[in-house]
Image (tube, rainbow, N blue to C red):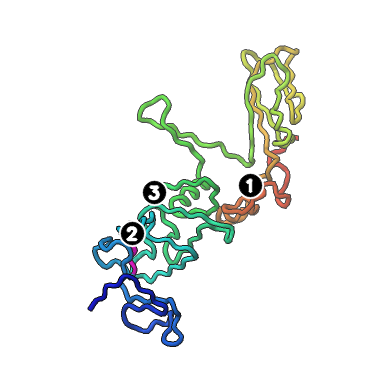
Amino acid sequence: MSFNLDDVNIGGQLKVGTGIVPAIKEGANKINGSMFAEGPIVFGGPTEFSDNKATLMVGRTKNIDKDCKPADRSLFVRGNTFLQGDDGTPYAVNQTGNSLITGNDQTPNALKISGGQSVDTLFVDGDVFVTGSVDCLSKGRLEARHAEADGKPKPFDIPHPSRDNYRLRYACIEGPEVGVYIRGRVNNQKVIVLPSYWKNLVHEDSITVQLQPIGAHQDIIIKRWDDEKIYLQSRGGMPINCFYHVYAERKDINPLIVEYQGDNCFDYPDPNYKPGAENPIYNDPEFAGPPNTITR
C-alpha cells in the first residue's frame, strides 16, 4: 500500500523500517523532530546510483520544480564532522576529485594525520608542491640517500659539457672545518683586499694564503694580515704578479666537533646539528670553541 501526499508535517518522529533506536529514544522520551531510516537511502536524483552503494547515498539534485535551483554541491555540512571507519572497505574515506582545506587558529595544524599499524601514515602517488616550510625526518629511499651522503663523498653528477653520451662527476672537498675561500690575481699591487664581510664571517687567526707567481720568480712573502687585507712583499720591491687563494674558517657558527663517540650522526654532541632539531642555534654558546685551524 502506498500514499501520495502533497505535504507532510511530522511533529514527533519519523521512522522508516523496524527496530528500537536508542539514539532518538522511544515512547514518552522520544526526541521530537528526530528520524530513523533503516536504509538504504537515496537523496538527489532517483537514478544517480545504479545499485546499493551505501546506507546513505547522496547524489545531485534533479528536482525539476521551477522554484528549485539545483546547488553546486551534493552535500554541505555546517558544523564539525566525525568519521569512524569499521574496516568494511580498505579506506574509511575514498575520494575522487580535488580537496580544499582551510584551517583556523583553534589548533596548530590545519590537517593532522595519525597512522595506525601501516608502514606509511601518508602515501602520495604523484608530485608534492609545498610553498611553506617542511619539518620532518626521513625514511625509505630518502633516508637511504641521506645515509649514503653521510658516509660517502658528496658528488655532483651532470651531463658532460663537451662529450656526447658521457657524464661528468665531481665531488666536494672535505676537511675538519667549515671553511670559506676566495681566489684571484694580484698584478702590480702589494695587498690582497678581502671581502668587507669577512671581518664578521671568519676567524682572523684561521686565515691561510697560497701564492703562485706568474712569469718569473718573485720571492713573494706575506708580511702580515688581518681580517681586511693580506700584505705582500717581493724581492727587491719588484712588481708582484701572482695568483692567490685565501682560506679561513667561519666564526658565525660553532666549529665542527671532528671526533665524537657514537654509532651514527644522531649521536653528534651538538644537538643543534641533529636531523630534525627544532629552532637550532648554530652559534649556541654552550658548544662554542676555538677554530679547528689556528694560524697565529
Quadrant of the frame with the C terminus: top right
Q: Nearer the viewer, residue 256 or 42?
A: 42
Q: Which residue is mark 3?
A: 126
The residue furthest bottom is: 28
**Which is more foreground, mark 2 or mark 1?**
2
Give the mark nearer the N terminus: 3 vs 1. Answer: 3
Identify the amino acid type marked 3.
Gly
Q: Is residue 111 left or right of residue 178?
A: left
- Crowding at dot 1, Cα within 10 Å, few <14 / some 14-19 / many 20+, comes out as few
Mark 1 lies on a secondary structure that is loop
- Circles 2, 1 touching at the beta carbon (< 8 Å): no
Give the mark nearer the N terminus: 2 vs 1. Answer: 2
Residue at screen point 73% across, 33% down: 199
Q: Nearer the viewer, residue 275 or 260?
A: 275
**Which is more foreground, mark 2 or mark 3?**
2
Identify the amino acid type marked 1.
Val
Residue at screen point 41% across, 24% down: 162
Question: Residue 229 at what x, y percent from top left?
Answer: 74, 26
The residue furthest left is: 1
Q: Which residue is mark 1?
A: 258
Q: Which residue is mark 2?
A: 61
Tell me how far mark 2 sits from mark 1, CA to CA: 69 Å
Question: Residue 86 at what x, y percent from top left?
Answer: 38, 71
Question: Residue 110 at what x, y percent from top left?
Answer: 52, 57
Q: Nearer the viewer, residue 198 or 20?
A: 20
- Crowding at dot 2, Cα within 10 Å, few <14 / some 14-19 / many 20+, comes out as some
Start-end of magenta stretch: 56-61
- Crowding at dot 3, Cα within 10 Å, few <14 / some 14-19 / many 20+, comes out as few
Give the mark nearer the N terminus: 2 vs 3. Answer: 2
